[in-house]
Image (cartoon, coloured by chain):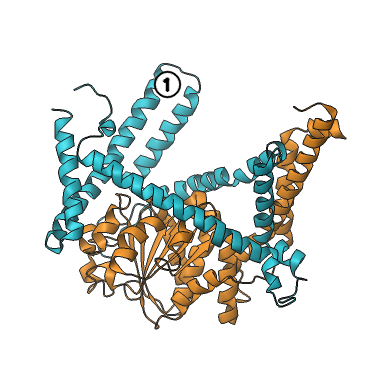
Amino acid sequence: MKRTVPLIIAGTVGFVLIVSYFIPYTESWGEDAMTWFNILAAIAFVLGAGNLVKMHLKKISDQQAGWGYSAITLAAFFFTLIVGMLKIGVTPSEKYPTNAWAGPYDQAGSAFRWVYDYLFLPLSATMFAMLAFYIASAAFRAFRAKNVEAIALLTTAFIVLLGRTYAGVWLTDWIPEESIGLEADALRLDNVTGTIMNTFNLAGMRAITIGIALGVASTSLKVLLGVDRSYLGSTDD
Amino acid sequence: MYTFLRDLDRRWIFLLMGIVATVPILAGWRFPEDPSPMVRDVFHAIEDLPDGSRIFMAYDYDPASQGELHPMALAFTRHCALKGHKLYFFTLWPQGGPLIQQNIRLIERNFPDYEYGEDYVNLGYRSGQEGPIKVIVTDLRKSVAVDVNGTSLSEIPMTRDIRNIQQMDLIVNVSAGYPGTKEWVLYASTPYNIETVAGCTGVSAPYLYPYYPEQLAGILGAIKAAAEYEYTLIEEYPQLKDDPTAQEALRRMGPQLVAHVTLIVLIIVGNTIYFVGRSRGDVT
């Protein structure tokens, strides 16, 4: 039963969505199915939050390695949740001035917004910015011209790295637009970068995209027909 | 020297990268740009629309990608406002709401004639990844019944007559990944023939190039394309020349240039050490 019901739901909804795409009369069926999906996706946030709390509480109670980080995660989670749900610091909206909770939770000046602007935003941006440092270290230690493929990759990297900045223009600006009847400016680094991205990369990406699409279509059909049941997790009924 | 470089602690490389990226920021280096045809296509997709056209601003990014994508989002917003277009802000990313508010702040500061509900509206965030796209493309109110302030769309002048996003003249999507440009192309712009332009991170740009020019009218790939877009915008609207807030992406091209050159130098030095080590028998 635990597996049969989800299989029936997945198959029915999947076929409804396919049918609604091709038959205009059934278009509203697909819209209703998607509305249900969007509601369920919102409820999934609650499940996700519950799972996060459960996992980290277990880590803290078992005193596993790094349990201090779990404590910080939970403290940050509950603090953000409480200030957001209670709308601390939110001023009432113009439409409902007497209702203290009428303003949006992420209103400028609210406690939630303060957490977002002064904790979440700089921490997220810092994590992303640190990539530059790790790439620099990797470039120095790991990017080796060991074989022909690596040399081709290195050469392409050099061209694209230079071509995506003013250095590419500055280094090859001297190349004339036309020479012996040929469009010589195609050899300028910024133009070579464009050729790499719009010709070689594009051809490769088209092949990959078509391959992925065919794979998605066949996997989807297997899921809808109940042949592939791996998304249900354990095989125990 | 060889031993010193071979055993160099990676923290020195971190320090080097930190210093070289900081210098152009402090010095305020700026470089001229030569906008690519793809960037010009994005510009003209917005510029050539009649004033007051309806633009759906789908801003699907978060603070992690803010450094790369926020300048292009601001440039899109500024350009649309300069043209007097009607802007409908929306996001599929839960962390995207406050970033939309920063775009709205730009409008409030620089375009005092723009009025909320008449010229721009914030539809906020909807959960369900690509799910809301599939719904709003045929029935907006089934997924978005109210704006971020809780006002019914039927009470807002600029949304009162909007049934679905097929009534939009253009979708402008800024995307940091999933859900993002690919989903807008698959479920909105291609099946319903809605013109769409996109801005994306450098790593996701190659995945989107196959959609240009048929399904996407243009793509801004990474901060370089954003800088070219700002450059084009300044060329067309010279009043922006003295406004530093209109040159955020151009400002970022200085550190990008120096960081890229540093990477190349590091690769060359690293390989020199490798080959010297191999000739000495240190490396197999």
Position of A230 relative to B227 (above/below): above
Chain ID at mark 1: A
Q: Give the x, y percent position of residue B2.
A: 85, 34
Q: At 33% across and 50% down in the image, what residue appears?
A: B129
Residue for point 53% across, 60% down: B221
The quadrant holding residue B67 is bottom right
Q: Residue A82: which quarter of the image? A: top left
User: Is residue B144 or residue A203 the one in the foreground?
Assistant: A203
Count of residue discs: 1
Question: Which residue appears at 55% of the width and 43% of the height?
Answer: A127
Q: Where residue B13 appears, x then y in whole percent?
A: 73, 40
**Farthest top residue in view:** A62
Task: Say which chain is cyan.
Answer: A
- Location of the C terminus of chain A (image quadrant): top left
Q: Residue furthest right?
A: B1
Residue B167, horizontal then vertical, whole percent: 28, 73
> Eyeballing the image, is B77 above or below A152?
below
Q: Is residue A183 visible?
A: yes
- Mark 1 is surrounded, within 10 Å at the Cα level, by few (under 14), some (14 to 19) or many (20 or more) other residues, namely some
B16 in relation to A97, above or below: above
Q: Which quarter of the figure is the N terminus of chain A placed in?
A: top left
Mark 1, residue position: A60
Q: Residue furthest front?
A: A180
Q: Toward the viewer: A70 or A184?
A: A184
Judging depth in this view, the residue of A229 and B79 nearest the camera is A229
Q: Position of residue B31 (x, y in %)?
A: 70, 68
Seen from the viewer's position, the closer of residues B234 and B97 is B234
Q: Is residue A110 visible?
A: no
Name the side, left or right, on which B231 lies relative to B156: right
Task: Give the residue type at disc 1.
Answer: Ile
Judging by colour alone, the chain drawn in orange in this rendered image is B
